[in-house]
Amino acid sequence: MSLPSEEEIRALVGQRFPGGHYTIAHWENFLLTECTGADPLPDDLAHPVALFHMPIPGANTSIGEMFALGRADSYSSIGIESYDWEIFETLREETEYRVEGVVTEADRLRKGDRVFDRIQFRFDLTDAEDRAVARTTITWRYHRANA
C-alpha cells in the first residue's frame, strides 16, 4: 500500500462514522467482568471495560475499517498510543446506547528516520434521553516505512 500524503491524513479530521446503537447484553457483561478478575456488579450495572470495544461496532464501524481509513500497511503496523474513557453516567446492561464517532486529530509525525501518522478517534455514547453517558477517545499510530 502506498504512503498517504500528509494532506490526505490531515483531511481525515472531521470524518464521521455512520453511527448506530449498542446494547451491552447480560452475558457479554458477565464475560467481560469475569475476564477482569472482578466479581459481578450488582443489579444491572455494566463493567466499564465494555468501553474498550462497544463504541466501535456501536458507531457502525470496525477495527478493520479504522485500519483502512488510515491506510495501514498491515495489522502489525498499528500501535496503540492511548485509550481514554470518560464516564458521565453508570453503564447498564440491556440498555440501548446511541453511539457517534468522529476523527478528531490526524497528523504526520517524524522521529529521526521513523515516520508515523497519529490518528485520534472519539466515540460518544448517549442514552434514550440524549444525555451523555460516556466518551471514548482512541489514539493510534500508523507506522510507516522509514523515511
Image (cartoon, rainbow, N blue to C red):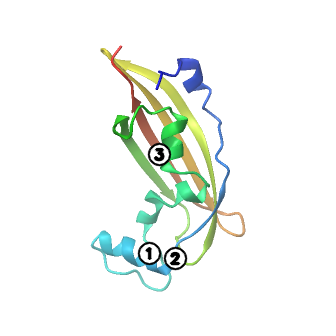
Q: Position of residue 100 (x, y in %)?
A: 64, 53
Looking at the rendered structure, the kind of residue marked 3 is: Ile
In the displayed structure image, the side of residue 112 where residue 43 appears, left or right? right
Q: Residues within 10 Å of mark 3 (few under 14, many from 20)?
A: some
Quadrant position of residue 98: bottom right
Residue hosting label 3: 138
Q: Residues within 10 Å of mark 1 (few under 14, many from 20)?
A: many
**Alpha carbons under labels 1 and 2: distance apart:** 6 Å
Please say if the residues under marks 1 and 2 sit with CB atoms less than 8 Å apart. Answer: yes
**Alpha carbons under labels 1 and 3: distance apart:** 21 Å
Earlier in the chain: of badge 2 and badge 3, it is 2
Per the image, label 3 sits on a secondary structure element best described as strand
Residue hosting label 1: 29
Q: Residue 139 — which label? A: none
Please say if the residues under marks 1 and 3 sit with CB atoms less than 8 Å apart. Answer: no
What residue occupies the far front of the structure in this picture? Answer: 1
Per the image, label 1 sits on a secondary structure element best described as helix
Q: Residue at x 39, y 24 (%)?
A: 144
Looking at the rendered structure, the kind of residue marked 1 is: Asn
Residue hosting label 2: 25
In the displayed structure image, the side of residue 11 where residue 107 appears, left or right? left
Q: Name the front one of labels 2 and 3.
A: 2
Label count reads: 3
Quadrant position of residue 132: bottom right
What residue occupies the far right of the structure in this picture? Answer: 129
Q: Position of residue 111 (x, y in %)?
A: 33, 19
Looking at the rendered structure, the kind of residue marked 2 is: Ala
Earlier in the chain: of badge 1 and badge 3, it is 1
**Alpha carbons under labels 2 and 3: distance apart:** 23 Å
In the displayed structure image, the side of residue 110 where residue 58 appears, left or right? right
Q: Position of residue 102 (x, y in %)?
A: 61, 43
